[in-house]
Image (cartoon, rainbow, N blue to C red):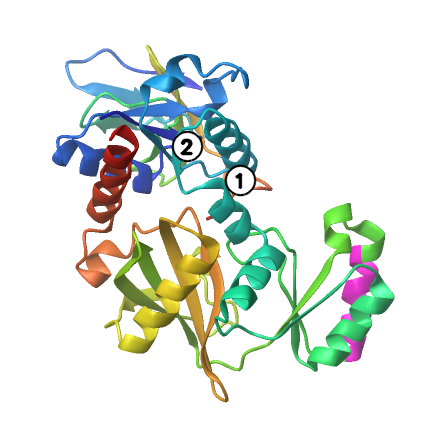
Amino acid sequence: MRIAMTYTRLRTEELLLLDAFEGLGIEVEPIDLRAVVFDPMNPGRWSAFDAVIDRSVSLTSTLTAVRILEGYGIRCINPLRAIEACSDKLSTTLALAGAGVPQPDVRVAVSPDAGLEAVEAIGYPAVLKPTVGSWGRLVDRLNDREADEAVLERLDTHGSAKQGVFYVQEHVNKPDRDIRVFVVGGEPIAAIVRHSAHWVTNTARGATAEGLELTDELRHLAVNGAEAVGADVVAVDLLECPERGLVVNELNHSMEFRNSITTTGVDIPRFVAEHAAHIAEGATA
Amino acid sequence: MSQATATTAITAVCPECDAVITFDRAPLNGQIVRCPDCGVELEVVSINPIVLEVAPEVEEDWGE
């Protein structure tokens, strides 16, 4: 069995994964995507791998590599379908809606005037997000119509074409925290709760994390969310809505976990490595 | 940009503060390390010899 791990930066997560594979006695070859030239018609040396786990921090690199690798017939972790569903918020919304997974209310428009209507339909405060983005960047909370008009005008004037999609989400009046469940191979393995006085509860934006016991409801929602996008390895972020209970806010296909191992007591990279090996074995068989 | 110093240990020099950074094992291209002295994040951009550059904090399409 041979596994490759593609990357563009070897951060703590990737080094922990390499250690986990080594600890399991599994041969894994780290491959820096920035040094690779693909021939889409000829797999060449890639045909030696039974599976590829992608850990690129660049979404563009991930999508490019996984599209080609799946074209070669190589099993990728995560599959392209899951990456596409997780990395684009509209795709996530549609996947969750199709699977009947509860999520915040959303409206989508493609012009500033319709964007204004979308916000009015959701009600203030509303959250305006880029459909592709991460770490809580470029997310606006629109508290009133004046803020709404100013932000929409700015995006219309200075934004890129992609920012011409107005993805408006209900602002869930959650407590000062959100919940993340790590799902590997369809099993929820650990959960953390992230606290922040700021409305964006993202550790990349300064939120602090601690371990959380997995409840049946958390397990159920996280597994359904992971299944909805078809992910092998995914972090499912949930919000606690005072009216509707838990809702799935987003899913992360290239999850970060460096601060969640000690806080949860769960060896997350080992679970990921074991599951990748399981998939590679299946591909070999 | 700074080149590794030649010692028995695997080391390189922080391009920001000149601190010596020691690696437990041979580093890989693209590996991110934090300078123990000045705290800046550095990227291994060459492994023979080991060359470090200040790592970019974020780029447009980076994320989870």
A280 lies above or below A103: above
Q: Main secondary structure of the magenta part?
A: helix
Residue A268 x/y as whole percent: 24, 51
Residue A245 x/y as whole percent: 44, 83
Question: Subunit of mark 1?
Answer: A
| Left or right for A149, reference A46 | right
| Left or right for A27, reference A113 | left
- Please tell me which residue is depicted at 54% across the width and 36% down the height of the picture: A63
Stretch in magenta? A145-155
Residue A283 in magenta stretch? no
Callout 1: helix, strand or loop? helix
Question: Subunit of mark 2?
Answer: A
**Going by the picture, which residue comes out furthest to the front?**
A285
| Left or right for A19, reference A243 | left
A163 lies above or below A117: above
Q: Could you tell me if the residues under marks 2 and 1 are in contact, i.e. CB atoms within 8 Å?
A: no
- Please tell me which residue is depicted at 84% across the width and 63% down the height of the picture: A112
Q: Are marks 2 and 1 on the same chain?
A: yes
Residue type indicated by callout 1: Leu
Q: Which residue is mark 2?
A: A9
Q: Which residue is mark 1?
A: A59
Residue A250 x/y as whole percent: 49, 62
Taking depth in this image into account, of A280 and A14 the one nearest to the observer is A280
Residue type indicated by callout 2: Arg
Q: Residues within 10 Å of mark 1 (few under 14, many from 20)?
A: many
- Please tell me which residue is depicted at 41% across the width and 50% down the height of the picture: A231
Q: Is residue A69 visible?
A: yes
Taking depth in this image into account, of A199 and A224 the one nearest to the observer is A224
Q: Quadrant of the N terminus of chain A?
A: top left
